[in-house]
Amino acid sequence: MIIVMASRKQEDVDFVVSKIEELGYNAHIIVGEKRTVIAAVGDERGKYRLQALEALPHVEQVFPILKPFKLVGREVKAESSMVECGPVKIGKGFFCVMAGPCAVESRDQIMETAAAVKEAGANMLRGGAYKPRTSPYSFQGMEEEGLRLLKEAGERYGLPVVTEVVTIEQVSVVMDYVDMLQIGARNMQNFGLLRAVGKTSTPVLLKRGMMSTINEFLMSAEYILSEGNPNVVMCERGIRTFETETRNTLDIQAVPVLKKYTHLPVIIDPSHASGHWDLVTPMARAAVAAGADGIIVEVHPRPAEAFSDGQQSLRPDKFKKMMEEITPLLNVMGMTIAR
Ligand code: PEP
Ligand code: MN
């Protein structure tokens, strides 16, 4: 249920929150530009008991949330949200460019990549330390040493860092090193992991499962918000279709569809979507034109030597060219890159 407050005073909001909690529901306060609303979420069955709260002073209106997702939806919060990772802003007119290798492989590799992407205009550094590989015999990542190197590179070049967390146990370790936690496509419905990152206040990059519908994707984001972490960025990274020419099929329509339903920022991963370096720039252009709030792109100084995903990684010169190509489009779309 949505409880629209007639008052924005803290004591009035606290009073209504206490009434919601007495009924056994969780109260999430959403302070908008024009109004404060409280989303009461919990057991669907007795939700109509909340209707009686309309009689409370300072409550303007109580109405049900019709969509299956609640906190991520525009019913609860009509205006778009912005997620901040240090100085980097994502959403509400701010475009992010996260770039870096699929995996951190060595000190030299991550430093060289960080320097190059910074110079070309990226505002965040990506790099996997725990890799979710299809084969247990493939390179699994440098683990905590990889996190240390990623953090060091991010600090040296002034780039907030994002890395994937694969298991619940890793969350507390990874959080100490990074500015943003990534939930990979393979874990989009790992509900325990979603709840674990939801209990932190670290921004989360949630990638769409390769076989997940948009509704399932939104419900996964709901898990994170329901635990109290509102800082979620959604990432479309391609889905499996009958097409074999590309690694996945980029569902570019997911951008406007997601934006219709959710206030959360939406970004595109043209690297994993296409699986080929030469498709990355055209799909990055498409992302901007479709209204995405950012991109996450794999960049490697020597893609042929990459331990993972070399075929879809851009060389620094190609990444620079990509940035030059998207800059005029960003201007047309009224988007700014915050640093
Ligand atoms: C990645 O970003 O390196 C990755 C493994 O992505 P995805 O989870 O989208 O496959
Ligand atoms: Mn990768």
Image (cartoon, grey):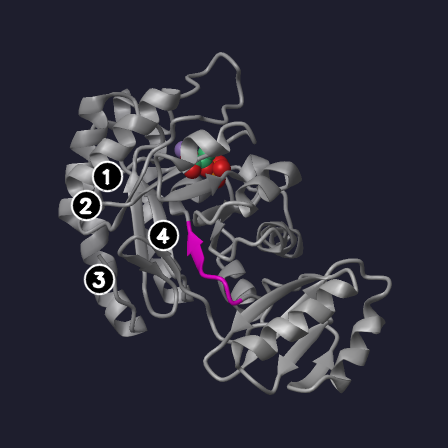
- Disc 1 versus disc 3: nearer the observer: 1
Q: Which residue is mark 3?
A: 327
Q: Position of residue 13 (x, y in %)?
A: 59, 75
Between 339 and 45, the one lying in front of the other is 45
Q: Are marks 1 and 4 in contact (CB under 8 Å)?
A: no
First to last magenta residue range: 263-268
Quadrant, the N terminus? bottom right
Q: Quadrant of ligand 2?
A: top left
Q: Position of residue 190 (x, y in %)?
A: 63, 37
Q: Position of residue 165 (x, y in %)?
A: 48, 33
**SS at badge 4:** strand
Q: CA distance from mark 3 to mark 4?
A: 13 Å
Q: Where is 269 relative to 153, above or below?
A: below
Q: CA distance from mark 1 to mark 4?
A: 18 Å
Instruction: Report if the beta carbon of the residue with label 2 is closer than 8 angstroms to ligand 1.
Output: no
Mark nearer the N terminus (2 vs 3): 2
Residue sitting at 55 percent across and 63 percent down?
Answer: 258
- Disc 4 versus disc 2: nearer the observer: 2
Q: Which residue is mark 1?
A: 154
Q: Which residue is mark 2?
A: 158
**SS at badge 1:** helix
